Image (cartoon, grey):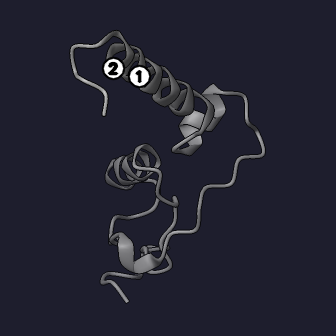
Amino acid sequence: MVRESSGAHRFLVRWVQIVLEEWRTTVPNSVLDAIRMGLWDFEPDDVDDEQFDSTTAMPGTGEKLQILARRIQEGLPLWHVHDRTDYDEETLR
């Protein structure tokens, strides 16, 4: 076991910090991360529709754009199968 005050412990902690930072900068968590990294063929992991909420926000509205932006930031798919798609839909399916 390595003692906390030893040089080996400090080296190991620093090494883990460097590895984690490198991982954060080489593995995109969202489409935005991938774009920043120049990974134009990035495909996010599939996310089950039950893991995030659909919306009744009208397409093209500020509300819908905010929801889409939040989904991107959270690494979620842009579209949910039950999102509102046109003017006539008023409730979630």
Which residue lies under the disc numbered 1?
12
As helix, strand or loop, the secondary structure at mark 2 comes to: helix
Q: Residue at position x 30%, y 84% from top? A: 91
Observer-nearest of 64 and 52: 52
> Within 10 angstroms of label 2, few (less than 14), some, or many (20 or more) residues?
some
Please tell me the numbered disc located at residue 76: none
Residue 70 percent location from the top left of the image? 36, 48
Observer-nearest of 49 and 58: 49
Q: Residue furthest front?
A: 1
Q: Is residue 78 left or right of residue 74?
A: right
Residue 8 percent location from the top left of the image? 38, 16
> Within 10 angstroms of label 1, few (less than 14), some, or many (20 or more) residues?
few
Q: Residue furthest bottom?
A: 93
Residue 75 percent location from the top left of the image? 47, 51
Which residue lies under the disc numbered 2?
9
Check if mark 2's residue and mark 1's residue have beta carbons within 8 Å: yes
Question: Which corner quadrant of the image does residue 39 belong to?
Answer: top right
Mark 2 and mark 1: Cα distance apart in space: 5 Å
Q: Residue at position x 38%, y 56% from top? A: 64
Residue type at mark 1: give it.
Answer: Leu
Residue type at mark 2: give it.
Answer: His
Q: Residue at position x 40%, y 16% from top? A: 14
